[in-house]
């Protein structure tokens, strides 16, 4: 399985993602400069965290017009896997690959901390390695992670089982106190309708080795690899 | 030349924590009469004078929807002025 990690000016989690895929997962991976327009050689595209284009205007607002984004739209339409982490999630929303928006955190503070998230839907290529309701520990590091969508969109996400993860307590309770940013329904990550695009605010690539405190995030990458092996 | 003045604000009903914080600070400073604050982004964009007014208006609307605002959570107002180069 071949992963591509997109590099925008201002990406800063691209090396973490590359490291985990290459040295922990032991899969093939390449960096892809944001001006690239051909993604035919890849199975999974990772949009990493960071501050693409300095977060000018709004987080992700400028990156969505990078040349690679047309290729990613087409790649996703053909069923390729796209994983947007943090700033990558913000870009996917701005680009319309996922519905809704991420607005500044309700308390106006940049939050850099470990959180617990609950696996809401484990029947997807990204999450089948987890059990439903499993609680994962991962770090967040963001200012604009407050997920918002109108009532109809929220209902659609629920009806189509597109909520991937919700912020929760250590024992899996989805409470206002466990919500680090004001997101509606404690939403930490969502899928597209076809479940081949996942956007999430927590950083699975920073939670993929025990020496760094948690390897709960590795399951997302492993799920994708196992999914591909079964398919072949 | 045309000058477009565009103001982007959050839609009604979307939490604007910055505005709430400013309102609270104003009240704390003793300005009890302040009952509401809204924040937004202000842009001045100049456009080629060869465009007609309606062409310029259409262009500003288009890029304000595409880039300057995120229609999911924001709306914008615009004003178009004819200015000397």
Image (cartoon, coloured by chain):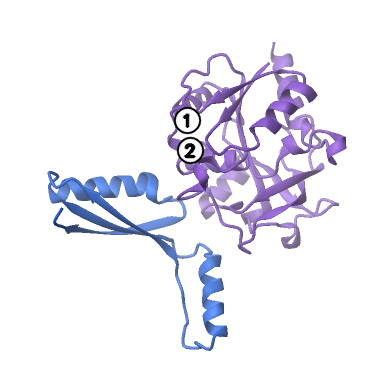
Chain colours: A purple, B blue
Q: How crowded is mark 1: few (under 14 residues within 10 Å), some or many (20 or more)?
A: some
The vertical placement of B22 against A15, above or below, is below
Describe the element under mark 1 as helix, strand or loop.
Answer: helix
The vertical placement of A60 against A44, above or below, is below
The reply to whether residue A151 is in sight is: yes
Farthest front residue in view: B85
Question: Which chain does the residue under circle 1 lie in?
Answer: A
Q: Residue at x 73, y 42 (%)?
A: A120
On screen, residue B16 versus residue A178, left or right, reads left
On screen, residue B8 versus residue A133, left or right, reads left
Q: Which of marks 1 and 2 is in front?
A: 2
Question: Which chain does the residue under circle 2 lie in?
Answer: A
Closer to the camera in the image, A172 or A101:
A101
Which numbered marker is on residue A136?
none
Describe the element under mark 2 as helix, strand or loop.
Answer: helix
Q: How many labels does the image show?
A: 2
Q: Which x, y percent locates residue A145?
A: 61, 51
Task: Locate residue A127: give its quadrant.
Answer: top right
The vertical placement of A37 against A183, above or below, is above
The reply to whether residue A98 is in sight is: no
Q: Which x, y percent locates residue A185?
A: 65, 54
The reply to the same-chain question for discs 1 and 2 is: yes
User: What residue did someone put label 1 on?
Assistant: A69
Label 1 with label 2: CB-CB less than 8 Å? yes
Which numbered marker is on residue A63?
2
Q: Which x, y percent locates residue A76?
A: 53, 26
In primary-sequence order, the first of circles 1 and 2 is 2
Task: Locate residue A47: give its quadrant.
Answer: top right
Q: Which x, y percent locates residue A203?
A: 71, 40
Q: Which residue is drawn at 63% across and 55% down?
A: A183
Q: Which residue is drawn at 69% across and 26% down?
A: A18
Task: Locate residue A6: give its quadrant.
Answer: top right
């Amino acid at each position: 399985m071949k992963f591509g990690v997109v590099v925008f000016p201002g990406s800063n989690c691209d090396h973490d993602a590359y490291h985990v895929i290459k040295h922990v997962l032991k899969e093939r991976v390449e960096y892809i400069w944001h001006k690239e327009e051909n993604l035919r050689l890849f199975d999974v595209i990772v949009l990493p965290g960071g501050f693409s284009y300095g977060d000018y205007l709004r987080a992700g607002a400028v990156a969505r017009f990078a040349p690679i984004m047309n290729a990613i739209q087409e790649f996703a339409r053909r069923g390729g896997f796209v994983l947007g982490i943090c700033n990558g999630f913000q870009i996917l929303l701005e680009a319309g690959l996922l519905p809704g928006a991420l607005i500044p955190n309700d308390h106006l503070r940049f939050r850099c901390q470990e959180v617990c998230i609950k696996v809401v839907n484990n029947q997807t290529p990204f999450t089948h390695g987890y059990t439903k309701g499993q609680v994962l520990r991962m770090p967040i590091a963001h200012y604009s992670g407050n997920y918002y969508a109108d009532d109809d969109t929220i209902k659609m996400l629920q009806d189509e089982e597109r909520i991937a993860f919700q912020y929760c307590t250590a024992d899996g309770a989805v409470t206002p106190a466990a919500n680090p940013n004001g997101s509606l329904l404690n939403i930490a990550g969502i899928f597209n309708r076809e479940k081949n695009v996942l956007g999430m605010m927590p950083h699975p690539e920073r939670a993929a080795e025990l020496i760094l405190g948690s390897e709960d995030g590795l399951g997302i990458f492993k799920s994708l690899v196992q999914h591909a092996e079964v398919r072949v | 030349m045309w000058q477009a003045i565009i103001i982007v604000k959050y839609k009604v009903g979307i939490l604007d924590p910055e505005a709430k914080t400013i309102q609270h600070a104003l009240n704390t400073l003793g300005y009890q009469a302040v009952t509401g604050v809204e924040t937004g982004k202000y842009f001045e964009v100049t456009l080629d004078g060869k465009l007609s007014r309606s062409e310029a208006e259409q262009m500003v609307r288009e890029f304000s929807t595409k880039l300057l605002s995120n229609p999911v959570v924001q709306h914008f107002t615009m004003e178009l002025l004819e200015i000397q180069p």
